[in-house]
Amino acid sequence: MTTILRIAEAARAASRIIAKASVEQRTRALHAIADALDHARPAILAANAQDLAASAELAPAMLDRLRLDDGRLASLGRAVREIAAAPEILGRVEKPETRPNGLAIARVRIPLGVILMIYEARPNVTIDAAALCVKSGNACILRGGREAIHSNRALAEAARAGLVAAGLPADIIQLVPTTDREAIAALVKLDELIDLCIPRGGEGLIRYVAEHARVPVIKHYKGVCHVYVHAAADPATALAIVENAKVSRPGVCNALETLLIDRAIADTFVPALVTRLAGRVELRGDDAVCRLGGGTIQPATEADWHAEYLALILAVRVVDGIGDAITHIERYGSSHTESIVTTDAESAERFLREVDSSTVMVNASTRFADGGELGLGAEIGISTTRLHAYGPMGAEGLTTTKFVVRGTGQIRS
Amino acid sequence: MTTILRIAEAARAASRIIAKASVEQRTRALHAIADALDHARPAILAANAQDLAASAELAPAMLDRLRLDDGRLASLGRAVREIAAAPEILGRVEKPETRPNGLAIARVRIPLGVILMIYEARPNVTIDAAALCVKSGNACILRGGREAIHSNRALAEAARAGLVAAGLPADIIQLVPTTDREAIAALVKLDELIDLCIPRGGEGLIRYVAEHARVPVIKHYKGVCHVYVHAAADPATALAIVENAKVSRPGVCNALETLLIDRAIADTFVPALVTRLAGRVELRGDDAVCRLGGGTIQPATEADWHAEYLALILAVRVVDGIGDAITHIERYGSSHTESIVTTDAESAERFLREVDSSTVMVNASTRFADGGELGLGAEIGISTTRLHAYGPMGAEGLTTTKFVVRGTGQIRS
């Protein structure tokens, strides 16, 4: 535990330096990190091979997340250079205003301080998070998963070398050397040293963090995303969106999990759906859907309406109009992403207004709920709780504003 | 504890209704609350008299905070009507953008949900907080101090009557009927039902909340505000600002507590300060200040640099230039408000850039660190931690944004 405290204290000290670094220096550091990733490629791939060998018994999908190769490393480096090239955030002046007494008031963007990132198998998060923290003037403490520990050490070393090459202290980026949960419990209590914790991973990890935390946590529990096919939907548009949202990448949090079909069009839409997804997606339906599906559909249980399958399974329900669809989403949704398919503008606006998820859509695939697709640049996570950030969160989400007041001797009467 | 859970569940249910209420309905509710305050004036004053009688042994300053009279009630009602008249926040569209694929993206302001407000002696917070929550579409749970319990009950009844008169459920505003700390500990654990807790009061209360909380907390620990009189300060401006910041209302959090004087001008400024504040403010100085003060100044101890006196006492220190001043503030400051007095633009900009408190000023009294003075309208609190809000926080601080995406059938490749 003394190691943990030492890491957090070093991060706090380093955060004061990165916060005052110029945009030129932070940009130079990001390019130096990308360069260091190139130079260290053999060492990183050797470390990754070690992780892969130790995890041979993992599921193929997990192994794929863990694996690094030349192509993936090159694209990691490109992502860092793109972050470097994105518009500067720090020092940005917002809502400037001159008060009747002559005080000139503005809000100015500043870093949060020290970010604690807790994540699981994917080693690329080590570099993505480090680069977003450098961009936004924050120090970061990285705590990756056990499976990726050798890869993460090699990646963090490259990132630290980049900082040093740009004349900044290595301790702006620190990797927790152990992967025990006790280290997490100790870190998330250090609210004098850490400003924000972002856990990314399974629900178990996130609940563990929330339970022990005294530092603020931005949670992303899960994505139980819905598409609602309205009575006035164009069926071809609806089928294309449902297919894309479910099939294009089923293992990610913005994939479709529950499909709601308006009763007015269920007679024709359910058979079309069965035809469209036949042999690719397992459907689990309510009574009406099972009846219309002609015996090909499994009956859904209550658990299916709560499920984040992250697999080629889709829960399907017939609803009685838009009010019923919204009620279903309120009850079972996860505040992530919901989309209505309709040609009726009034229903579209009602859905956008009344559904209070972090991303609400009309006539678009839920797969667009992503920082890059929504124009935020690289994404550090997706928040499904409302404080500070709600929805996809980019570098700006790692900043706040202070009030700057310029006077000429004003006193308050 | 079942009472606590019932209150929080009722607040969650009511939050869904106020979130969907139109601006007309929320405005009508605010005017009805102001009307109800008028009608209930005799009952409120009688309840307040009961509180005052039970607290007769309190310090005069505390009794003054607790006291309501016709004038104070009238100004409470006016404040509610001003909140009603302020610009609408909900539904405001921010950062609209059309992506290359034609998706139209915007962020739209929405309420946070359920706000838990925990406060101490001042009963007017009951109405201020309730009105700001109604304005911003949130439900609120109010837990005031023991001394004000009868006043708070009468005020909350008036606010609830106003909601009902406007056709909204009374449970949008609820007062916790007890004032034991166990109720606080139970409330701040209900992170499925409460979205944000704002504690306002002494450091003990706020630390108690932080220790027990699982809901997000916006903390305002204390205000150890600094004025730094730079070498290039205009002495008359500096004296006026120091006097105003210390003397105009010493019991509030934006009052000056520590004065830093540049060594280059200390020889003349310290004697001028002694003359200006003589007989009104107790000065506690470091060695240099005591020497220059000619025997009239008490020596300061380490504790004085940390002190939030909230009284007519001022800690005074000589510093070696702006770097030393900033280092002192980094070490002893509370992230509240700091002001530099100088005619040198470069030093002013360095101070504004490098001091990372929530409000930083040049040539202005720290007493302007206030929601109303900074143009936010009525203030629900001042945050000295960086997440979600930093510095004075108005109704907008009780909202967040969701992403709204309008497509024409886009799918992700």
Image: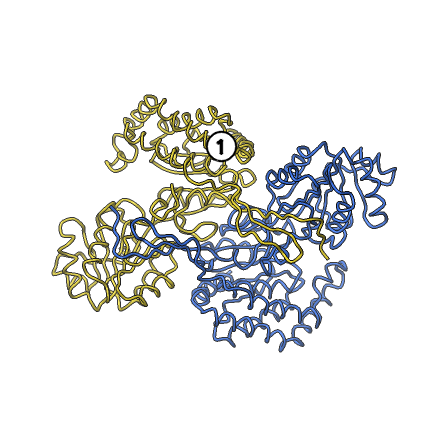
Chain colours: A blue, B yellow
Label 1 chain ID = B
Question: How many neighbours does mark 1 have within 10 angstroms: few (below 14), some (14-19), or many (20 or more)?
Answer: few
The answer to whether B359 is drawn above or below residue B90 in the figure is: below
Which of A28 and B165 lies nearest the eye of the viewer?
B165
Residue type marked 1: Glu
The answer to whether A244 appears left or right of B31 in the picture is right
Residue A33 point in image, percent of width and height: 57, 72
Q: Under tag 1, what secondary structure? A: helix
Residue placed under numbered mark 1 in the picture: B24
Determine whether A79 is above or below B390 in the image: below
Q: Position of residue A85 (x, y in %)?
A: 56, 68
* Count of residue discs: 1
User: Which quadrant of the figure has residue B49?
Assistant: top left
Does residue A60 appear to the left or right of B378 in the view shown?
right
Q: Residue at x 50, y 75 (%)?
A: A166
Residue B220 percent coordinates (x, y): 39, 47
Q: Residue at x 60, y 64 (%)?
A: A128
Q: Quadrant of the C terminus of chain A?
A: top left
B368 or B285, nearer to the observer? B368
Q: Position of residue B37 (x, y in %)?
A: 37, 26
* The image quarter in which residue A31 lies: bottom right
